[in-house]
Image (cartoon, rainbow, N blue to C red):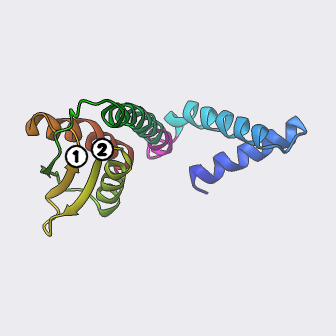
Amino acid sequence: MNPFSINMVLGVVWAALSGEFTLASLLVGFVVGFVTLWAMQPLFPANRYCAKVIGLIVLAAFFLRELLVSSVKVAWSVFTPLRNSKPGIISIPLEPSSNIQLTVLANLISLTPGSLSLDISADRKHLVVHAMFIEDPDDFRNEIKQGMEHRVKEALHK
């Protein structure tokens, strides 16, 4: 049985013991089950379930922050008479990644207001992005590589 299944069972057991099968009870049970599995992690050294879940939570929090900041920046640019956008198309070098990592990275960039993933090179070493605010191309590349790409790799490593 994989750790996710065990976590689901622990969540259902928690809900059964609490006497309520509500979504809130199941979520609390899932969190309690996760904490239990995290505490038992030294007993199962090959298990990286907890690290993957924490990596996904960090990626989701980072993306939500980027979503909020970029939404405000785009809204400010649209609603103010000053047009401070400097749009451009830029190529971002990528380190070798799995297909899922490239897909998630490209989609997260496209979901962020003010940027759009256009293409991935045939050799999978460059991602072409259109962005609304490119003050310095090198800063933009570093922001993507050290921010979004780094967190996607951490969350989705094998």
* Residue 112 image position (x, y, % from top left): 36, 44
Residue 46 located within the stretch drawn in magenta: yes
Outermost residue to the right: 19
Residue 108 located within the stretch drawn in magenta: no
Which amino acid type corresponds to the residue marked 1 in the rendered image? Ala
Which of the marked residues, 1 or 2, is nearer the chain's N terminus?
2
Residue at 86% over, 35% down: 18
Label 1, residues with CA under 10 Å away: few <14, some 14-19, many ≥20 = many
Residue 104 position (above or below residue 58): below
Residue 11 position (above or below residue 125): above
* Residue 16 image position (x, y, % from top left): 86, 43
Which amino acid type corresponds to the residue marked 2 in the rendered image? Gly
User: Decide: marks 1, 2 in contact (CB < 8 A)?
Assistant: yes
In which quarter of the view is residue 154 placed? top left
| Alpha-carbon span between mark 1 and mark 2 | 6 Å
Count of marks, rendered view: 2
Mark 2 lies on a secondary structure that is loop
Q: Which residue is mark 1?
A: 131
Q: Which residue is mark 2?
A: 114
* Residue 110 image position (x, y, % from top left): 33, 52
Observer-nearest of 125 and 140: 140
Residue at 15% over, 41% down: 141
Span shown in magenta:
44-53
* Residue 92 image position (x, y, % from top left): 14, 49
Label 2, residues with CA under 10 Å away: few <14, some 14-19, many ≥20 = some
- The quarter of the picture where the N terminus appears is bottom right
Residue 80 position (above or below residue 9): above
Left or right of residue 82, residue 22 in this image: right
